[in-house]
Image: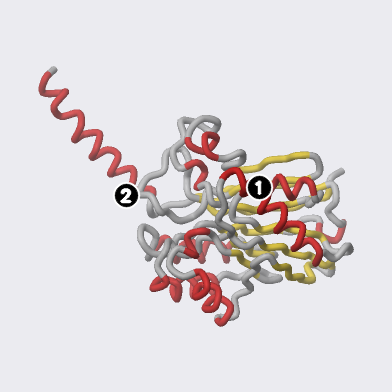
């Protein structure tokens, strides 16, 4: 018994290390079909690839990033939408990150927002270089595209650092300002790195919000218990309130070397008109 007890800590350590190394190079494609009451008939069947939290550099590099681009393109979606944390922290990795984004293909285009990790070294320089590369970066801004003959408007929120008791108020102010740009005849989609922006989206009656940031909770006992619900109101998958829906991605990259019951992922969405 003593020998087993002595061996247990290193065996556990080796086991966790094996799991950690294995998960760094794998991700899944998670698919949702969303029934949206306000979806125009012209957009019935529209598809979106939602990519979040790539964290290029550090623990996410090489083959898994190439596979991410290949998988995204193989899905042949109408839109590719990215919800922040392109790089892990270092601007030295930004050129690679930009190249990966520019290699992704959406039939009607690609748009992205920033995440908190994108700002760790120099947020202004991140913004300058991404925009200079011609990547559509939405920072408290909107953009429109003609998808299947119908206008779709994307709203992207800038990452704003705020205390927990202030963040909802700050987000509500951002939403109030950015929605002044709303075109009433366009179908709106909100991109927000932090999923708590969904509360403001519900108040604005926005039909679809995409978010990341949570890494699916990172350490989960099961799909309902763990770090996710301890820290976030919304942490993984699909949430519905009234006529508004939120999809939170677990993210495809990593900034910690292990996930438990929170697998890395790319999300594929198919939008359908509600019956």
Residue at the location (76% across, 70% down)? 144
Q: From what the image shows, is residue 58 above or below residue 11?
A: below
Mark toward the start of the polypeptide (2 vs 1): 2
Q: Quadrant of the N terminus?
A: top left
The spot of residue 251 in percent (x, y) is 51, 52
Pointers 2 and 1 in contact (CB under 8 A)? no
Q: Tell whether 184 sits left or right of 172.
A: right
Query: Which residue does the numbered mark 2 point to in the structure image?
Result: 21
In the figure, residue 242 lies in which quadrant?
top right
Of tags 2 and 1, the one toward the viewer is: 1
In the figure, residue 189 lies in which quadrant?
bottom right
Q: From what the image shows, is residue 206 above or below residue 11?
A: below
Residue at the location (73% across, 47% down)? 34
Q: Is residue 31 visible?
A: no
Q: Is residue 27 visible?
A: yes
The spot of residue 237 in percent (x, y) is 61, 43
Q: Quadrant of the C terminus?
A: top right
Compare residues 250 and 92 and report the one nearer the observer: 92
Q: Tell whether 157 sits left or right of 202.
A: left
Q: Secondary structure at mark 1?
A: helix
Compare residues 37 and 273 and report the one nearer the observer: 37
Q: Secondary structure at mark 2?
A: helix
Query: Which residue does the numbered mark 1 point to in the structure image?
Result: 168
Q: From what the image shows, is residue 28 above or below residue 130?
A: above
């Amino acid at each position: 018994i003593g020998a087993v007890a002595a061996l247990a800590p290193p065996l556990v350590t080796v086991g966790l290390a094996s799991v950690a190394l294995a998960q760094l190079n794998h991700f899944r494609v998670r698919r949702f079909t969303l029934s949206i009451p306000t979806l125009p008939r012209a957009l019935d069947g529209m598809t979106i690839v939602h990519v979040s939290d790539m964290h290029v550099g550090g623990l996410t590099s090489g083959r898994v990033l190439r596979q991410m681009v290949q998988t995204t393109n193989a899905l042949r979606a109408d839109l590719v939408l990215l919800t922040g944390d392109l790089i892990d922290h270092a601007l030295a990795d930004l050129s690679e990150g930009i190249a990966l984004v520019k290699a992704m293909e959406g039939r009607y285009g690609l748009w992205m927002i920033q995440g908190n990790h994108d700002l760790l070294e120099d947020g202004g320089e991140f913004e300058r270089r991404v925009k200079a590369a011609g990547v559509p970066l939405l920072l408290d801004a909107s953009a429109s595209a003609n998808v299947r003959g119908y206008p779709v408007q994307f709203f992207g929120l800038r990452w704003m650092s705020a205390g927990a008791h202030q963040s909802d108020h700050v987000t509500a102010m951002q939403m109030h300002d950015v929605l002044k740009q709303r075109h009433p005849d366009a179908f709106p989609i909100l991109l927000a790195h932090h999923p708590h922006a969904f509360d403001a989206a519900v108040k604005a009656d926005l039909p679809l919000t995409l978010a990341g940031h949570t890494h699916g909770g990172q350490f989960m006992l099961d799909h309902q218990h763990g770090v996710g619900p301890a820290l976030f109101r919304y942490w993984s998958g699909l949430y519905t309130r009234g006529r508004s829906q939120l999809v939170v991605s677990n993210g495809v990259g990593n900034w910690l070397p292990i996930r438990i019951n929170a697998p890395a992922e790319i999300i594929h969405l198919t939008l359908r008109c509600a019956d």
